[in-house]
């Protein structure tokens, strides 16, 4: 049976551009593209099976161990398909590069393919969303994996009363931050209300509520976090602002 547009779009991404086995990749190329397929990306136009295969090999050499993953469903109308993607590091879902493919389909094969890399704000947003997904899941090592080698982490406040506040600049320091919070409070709520992105900077607005075990008090505060993302897709700045007086008061008997 002819392949559906969804099958063609996923095969294009995963069986061609993410496939490192040459024989399997060439078999997929023969199956899903017209013989005179035209692929347009930022480097220009590539025509035909052999040229597309050679370009895919060249691209994979540049990408190293980065892999493609599909993002969201395939959007389609008769004869046209759209699928977004991320390029990610092994064992990570944090995007290093984001983009999308658009294909024109005729007689069950792709006749034209267009690949577009999306702008930095979308990339920054995806990194921030991944960060809070990992925080919510308690994946501390996953959080650390998102940080750059020279990251700046700071939550200003009364560090004598609230031991997890203050500056951290090492992975161990971030581990201690989460360990100290876990030792003193029980989380009640963590709500992200809005993420505002401009270039490689994001501001996260939300609310956090915890119960302090030693005092039984509710620590319920709005917060704003400034997050910076570097050119390699890693977080180099995390500075959180909250009602520090309220947080300190909740820790006091």
Image (cartoon, rainbow, N blue to C red):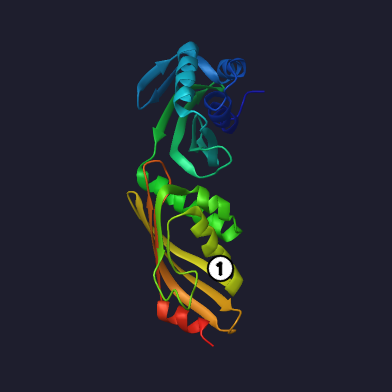
Q: Nearer the viewer, residue 115 or 82?
A: 115
Tell me what residue is drawn at x 57 percent, y 31 percent: 10
Quarter of the C terminus within the rendering: bottom right
Res. 64 visible in picture: yes
Which residue is farthest left?
198
Residue 36 visible in the snapshot: no
The image quadrant that residue 62 belongs to is top left
**Residue drawn at (59%, 55%) of the image:** 139
Res 217 quadrant in image:
bottom right
Residue 235 vertical placement versus 135 (above, below): above
Dividing the picture into quadrants, the one containing residue 72 is: top right
Residue 153 position in % (x across, y down): 41, 59
Q: In this view, does 13 lie above or below 121?
A: above
Question: Which quarter shows the N terminus?
Answer: top right
Which residue sits furthest bottom? 253
| Residue lying at 63% horizontally and 23% vertically, measured from the top left | 2
Q: In this view, does 202 lie above or below 84?
A: below
In the drawing, does residue 64 fall left or right of residue 3? Answer: left
Query: In the rendering, at what x and y percent does residue 111 appear?
Result: 47, 20
Q: Position of residue 221 (x, y in %)?
A: 46, 76
Q: Which of 43 and 20 is in front in this view?
A: 20
For label 1, the residue is 180
Q: Label 1: few (<14), some or many (≥20) within 10 Å?
A: some
Where residue 178 sits in the image (x, y, percent)? 55, 63
Asked if residue 11 is positioned above or below residue 150 in the image, the reply reads: above
């Amino acid at each position: 049976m002819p392949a559906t547009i969804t099958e063609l779009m996923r095969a294009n991404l995963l069986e061609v551009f993410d496939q490192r086995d040459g024989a399997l990749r060439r078999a997929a190329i023969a199956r899903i593209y017209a013989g005179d397929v035209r692929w347009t990306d930022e480097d220009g136009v590539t025509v035909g099976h052999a040229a597309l295969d050679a370009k895919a090999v060249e691209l994979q050499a540049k990408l190293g161990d980065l892999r493609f993953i599909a993002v969201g469903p395939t959007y389609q109308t008769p004869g046209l398909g759209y699928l977004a993607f991320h390029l990610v590091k092994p064992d990570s879902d944090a995007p290093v590069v984001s983009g999308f493919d658009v294909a024109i389909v005729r007689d069950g094969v792709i006749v034209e393919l267009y690949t577009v890399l999306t702008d930095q704000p979308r990339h920054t947003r995806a990194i921030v969303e991944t960060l809070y997904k990992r925080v919510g899941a308690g994946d501390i090592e996953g959080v650390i994996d998102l940080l750059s080698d020279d990251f700046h982490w700071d939550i200003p406040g009364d560090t004598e009363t609230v031991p997890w506040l203050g500056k951290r600049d090492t992975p161990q320091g971030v581990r201690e931050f989460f360990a100290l919070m876990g030792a003193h409070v029980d989380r009640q709520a963590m709500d992200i209300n809005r993420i505002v992105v401009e270039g490689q900077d994001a501001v996260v607005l939300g609310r956090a509520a915890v119960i302090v075990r030693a005092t039984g008090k509710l620590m319920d505060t709005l917060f704003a976090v400034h997050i910076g993302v570097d050119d390699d897709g890693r977080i180099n700045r995390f500075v959180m602002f909250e009602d520090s007086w309220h947080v300190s008061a909740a820790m006091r008997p």
